[in-house]
Image (cartoon, rainbow, N blue to C red):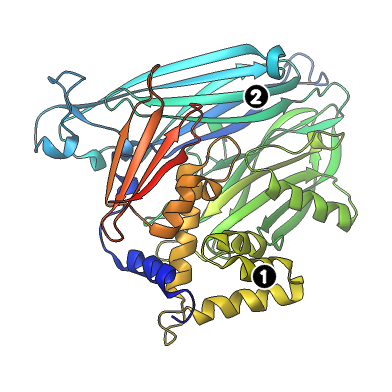
Amino acid sequence: MRAWPGLLLLLWTGALQARPDIFLSRDWEPDFQVRRGTRLRADTLDVARAPRESQVFTCLLNLSDLQLRRCDAPLAASAGADSLGPGGCYRAEYEISLELFSGEGRRRRSEASRYQHETLTLESSRADELAPRRWHRFQVELKPGRYSWWVEFQDLQSRRHVRREGRFRVLDLEREEQALSALWLLAEADSLDPDPLRSAPFVEERGGAHPTELIVYYEVWSRRAVTSTLSSLIIDRRERERHRRGIERAWPAGVTRNLLRVPLRDLGSGEYLVELSLDGKEREGRRLRRERAAWRAPGEEGEVDEELARRRRARFSVRWSGEPSDPVDLDRAVEQLRYILPPKRFRDLQEAPMSRRKALFDEFWDSVDPDSSTEANELMAEYYRRAEFADRRFSWSRFAGWRSDRGRIYMINGDPDQVERGGGGMDEPAWERWSYESNGREYLFIDRQGFGDYQLALDQGL
């Protein structure tokens, strides 16, 4: 390594350590995801009448993140599942709540709420005997308009909680002749009787089996029998087309339930955008601007216009087992170098023309490749693995996790050797203290506002 040896040696040393990933232990917030889909609820007596959009929120929980306690032990017991030994009865208990709001600022008001309490009992302390994931669904009827939502998960054994939030719009379909439902991404579905409420959601799997195809469930409503073209498109973060298909078919009056199956064998690890549209005809320049805007607004649907009822999109990720996490979006990958590049070199790379930027990017990583005899750049793969992990674990509201204080420290230092957590009550904000024995550093993060934005409050030597 010839450039900035101190910092890059720290990165590489962290990459070589074989300790288990502490962020997957019970000291960290669960891997909790929320997806939104819609069902088109039509009047069966009058198929020409415009349907209502029924909103369905799917909450995905990784059950291995739950805290297990003996069934006969008090909830306040401090012993973790790993210390309980084999045999006996064990319990996990958690709650999920959904809140929906209309309006903004002072005019914001609650429109609906849902709540679910769950208790799981098993005859062993081994969490891997539980199914890998469980999903809970909440169905809500809302009038057309703009809404925001938040979903909160709380593990009642450990008192750990996490919140997810976002915005959406319920469409008014009265002026439409034909409309699509929001897309459901599924891992399995019955072709003869497709029902997303009874089907497993599509979830990327790390280190395990991955679905061989993406199944997109969608509903089409037509005011009258009509023939139109359904177009499907998949693009990656570089805005390259990875799939395109157009099918002309006759749609009967009313609501039809449909499946689109897309093989995943040609897609590498990365993030993708899938879009379905009915007779969508656009200029290429407008399409490109829209696709770029879609990537800039994670977790939020595009602005509603006349075509949105006939065009829907959703995101998904593919992570093949054993495949390294390499950057797929050059602009984003360059931005993430701000933590390890000297300011002048970082500015030069940012301001370089696109034709030159990729060459400078490759030149930098080639200069710090720890083993040039191998095809892969292990240091680059480790750095962008950390960036990707920071996005999954430290994102809050609509802000990328790698930009947060915790994300920055994690990307530079890797997994801490020790983590302490506390606070979170009415009188004390939640806090986390990370300790690194390898470089003798300690970092304190405090969530002063209570929204998950943990800010760095202390950086000192041990």
Locate residue 82: give its quadrant: top left
At label 2, the amino acid type is: Ser
Instruction: Tell me if 446 is positioned left or right of 227 in this view.
Output: left
Height in image: 391 above or below 41? below
If you read the primary sequence from the N terminus, does the residue marked by circle 2 or circle 1 appear first? Answer: 2
Q: Residue furthest right?
A: 283
Check contact, mark 2 vs mark 1: CB within 8 A: no
Nearest the viewer among 17 and 37 is 17
Locate residue 44: give its quadrant: top right
Label 1 CA crowd tier, 10 Å (few <14, some 14–19, many 20+): many
Residue 107 image offset from top left, x and y in percent: 71, 12
Question: What is the tally of numbered marks visible in this picture?
Answer: 2
Mark number for residue 232?
none
Residue 100 image offset from top left, x and y in percent: 60, 18
**Residue appearing at x 71%, y 19% in the figure:** 104
Height in image: 154 above or below 315? above
Q: Which residue bears the numbered disc 2? A: 148
Instruction: Tell me if 193 is positioned left or right of 431 in this view.
Output: right
Nearest the viewer among 90 and 432 is 432
Height in image: 217 above or below 295? above
Residue 281 image offset from top left, x and y in percent: 88, 49
Instruction: Tell me if 354 is positioned left or right of 55 in this view.
Output: right
**Element type at marker 2?**
strand
Q: Which residue bears the numbered disc 1? A: 349
Locate residue 131: give its quadrant: top left
At label 1, the amino acid type is: Leu
Mark pair 2, 1: CA separation: 38 Å
Residue 251 in view (yes/no): no
